[in-house]
């Protein structure tokens, strides 16, 4: 990568990180933006038929489509465009003096309800309940209304729509097309729109790629702990240093809020870590994450995304009986080692408790692994909230078309192992059937070491504490 291209990419990554703070996006955003643009344009056309001369309807529709296409990459701009369309329609109706008053009132009501309802509908269609984007869309809508109230801007916009000649339409179309391609190219080139790339159906690992992976439930940063010194604000520096000392290529993190992820991203400096994953509540940053930190200097993301453990896996939801009945999100990605082009498929999960949940979740997880990973070796790390003695284990280990095995059991022999991976921040905690955090691997992964770490640190109160209410697992393997 040239120096100039690196600077360009870095600038745009920082700019779009402001708009899309949830990590990597997928092509679904582009598809649903396009869908939203056509829906908006179609409804706008229906509203215009009543108030505009027929010969201008198609031209006005095409102009609106150009505006929407250009603005669709950034939700706030899309909101501005929707607002300007709405205000334009409102003023057009207002100026149609020949319409009866009752007809005007009906059209105005339909316009208001239609446009405002459309904002909400498109937020769902485009963003699958990604509330941050919905807020940006609505915020842009408000800004657009304010801009339209400024006389020079309003006159400029009215002149564009009024003089919808073929020559002007051609100019607008060309400019919009160029902007559309430039914005789309920027998103694609910087990795913010990542198409789903099917995994190879045949793949033979060399067995020489040495990979270290850790999985760790770091305890949510909003929890109210029995001991104040176990709260996030007191332990965040120590747990960041602790995680950094893993020196892992991949770290599957569970129960982390976005502010915790941002903090770890800043503080982890043994490697240049980036992450893949989304908040379980909105698919962007809201709620707990089960994300994957990866060494971005050694590995690049080929494709990746999130899905939810429910009957509706493509958006935040929960439909299976669990102890906590909260949405449970899975982060996944196919990684490529930059130097060798070797691939590995990594997943981070956090299960709910309960027999129905874990059994159905295991079936869904195994099916997704088979679909997304193809013949690429697989590593799954997470907090499963159950152990090998509970129902559903048979649907996780050695199950499905791409069977997995517990890395710990491969090294230390078949279970049950009388071990804990939880501690409740209690140094005297002892429940030796509570190994509920695991790393699973496919047969192509040769595990050379797998250990549970139960270290402590001295907090500012001068006493020993655990870093989290879970213990981390680390695994060394050859792929």
Image (tube, rainbow, N blue to C red):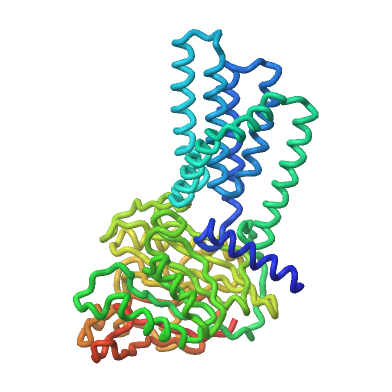
- Residue at image point 37% right, 72% down: 383
Instruction: Pick the quarter of the image with the N terminus.
Output: bottom right
Residue 341 can be seen in this image: yes
Q: Nearer the viewer, residue 11 or 447?
A: 11
Q: Is residue 55 positioned above or below 197 on the image?
A: above
Q: Position of residue 76 (x, y in %)?
A: 53, 47
Q: Position of residue 319 (x, y in %)?
A: 35, 51
Q: Nearer the viewer, residue 207 or 469?
A: 469
- Residue at image point 46% right, 22% down: 110
| Image side of residue 210 versus residue 316, left or right | right
Res. 259 image quadrant = bottom left
Of all residues, the one furthest to the right in this rendering is 167
- Residue at image point 64% right, 32% down: 157
Res. 91 image quadrant = top right
Q: Nearer the viewer, residue 463 or 309?
A: 463
Instruction: Pick the quarter of the image with the C terminus.
Output: bottom right
Q: Position of residue 250 (x, y in %)?
A: 52, 77
Q: Is residue 296 positioned above or below 359 on the image?
A: below
Q: Nearer the viewer, residue 378 or 359?
A: 378
- Residue at image point 71% right, 47% down: 179
Q: Is residue 52 positioned above or below 268 on the image?
A: above
């Amino acid at each position: 990568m040239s120096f100039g291209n690196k600077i360009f990419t870095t600038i745009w990554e920082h700019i779009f990180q402001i708009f899309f703070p949830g990590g990597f996006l997928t092509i679904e955003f582009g598809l649903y933006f396009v869908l939203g643009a056509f829906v908006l344009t179609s409804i706008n056309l229906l509203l215009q038929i009543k108030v505009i001369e027929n010969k201008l309807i198609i031209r006005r529709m095409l102009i609106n489509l150009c505006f929407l296409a250009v603005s669709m990459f950034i939700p706030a701009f899309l909101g501005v465009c929707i607002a300007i369309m709405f205000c334009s329609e409102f003023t057009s109706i207002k100026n149609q003096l020949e319409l009866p008053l009752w007809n005007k009132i009906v059209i105005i009501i339909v316009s208001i309800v239609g446009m405002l309802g459309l904002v909400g509908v498109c937020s769902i269609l485009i963003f699958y309940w990604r509330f941050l984007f919905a807020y940006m869309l609505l915020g842009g809508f408000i800004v657009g209304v304010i801009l339209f109230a400024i006389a020079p801007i309003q006159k400029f916009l009215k002149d564009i729509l009024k003089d919808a000649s073929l020559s002007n339409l051609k100019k607008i179309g060309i400019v919009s097309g160029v902007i559309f391609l430039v914005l789309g190219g920027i998103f694609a080139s910087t990795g913010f729109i990542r198409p789903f790339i099917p995994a190879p159906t045949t793949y033979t690992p060399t067995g020489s790629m040495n990979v270290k992976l850790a999985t760790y439930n770091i305890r949510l940063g909003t929890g109210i702990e029995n001991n104040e010194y176990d709260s996030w604000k007191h332990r965040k520096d120590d747990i960041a240093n602790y995680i950094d000392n893993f020196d892992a290529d991949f770290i599957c993190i569970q129960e982390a809020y976005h502010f915790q992820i941002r903090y770890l991203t800043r503080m982890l400096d043994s490697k240049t870590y980036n992450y893949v994953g989304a908040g379980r509540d909105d698919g962007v940053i809201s709620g707990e994450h089960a994300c994957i930190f990866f060494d971005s200097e050694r590995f690049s993301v080929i494709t990746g995304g999130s899905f939810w453990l429910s009957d509706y896996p493509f958006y935040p939801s929960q439909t299976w009986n669990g102890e906590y009945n909260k949405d449970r999100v899975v982060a996944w990605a196919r990684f490529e080692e930059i130097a060798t082009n070797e691939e590995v498929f990594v997943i981070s999960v956090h299960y709910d408790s309960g027999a129905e949940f874990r059994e159905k979740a295991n079936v869904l997880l195994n099916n997704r692994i088979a679909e997304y990973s193809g013949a690429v070796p697989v590593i799954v790390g997470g907090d499963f909230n159950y152990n090998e003695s509970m129902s559903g284990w048979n649907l996780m280990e050695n199950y499905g078309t791409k069977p997995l095995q517990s890395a710990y059991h491969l090294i230390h022999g078949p279970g049950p192992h009388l071990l804990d991976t939880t501690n409740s921040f209690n140094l005297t905690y002892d429940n030796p059937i509570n190994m509920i955090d695991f790393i699973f691997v496919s047969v192509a992964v040769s595990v050379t070491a797998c250990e549970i770490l139960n270290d402590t640190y001295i907090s500012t109160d001068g006493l020993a504490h655990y870093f989290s209410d879970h213990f981390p697992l680390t695994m060394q393997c050859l792929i």
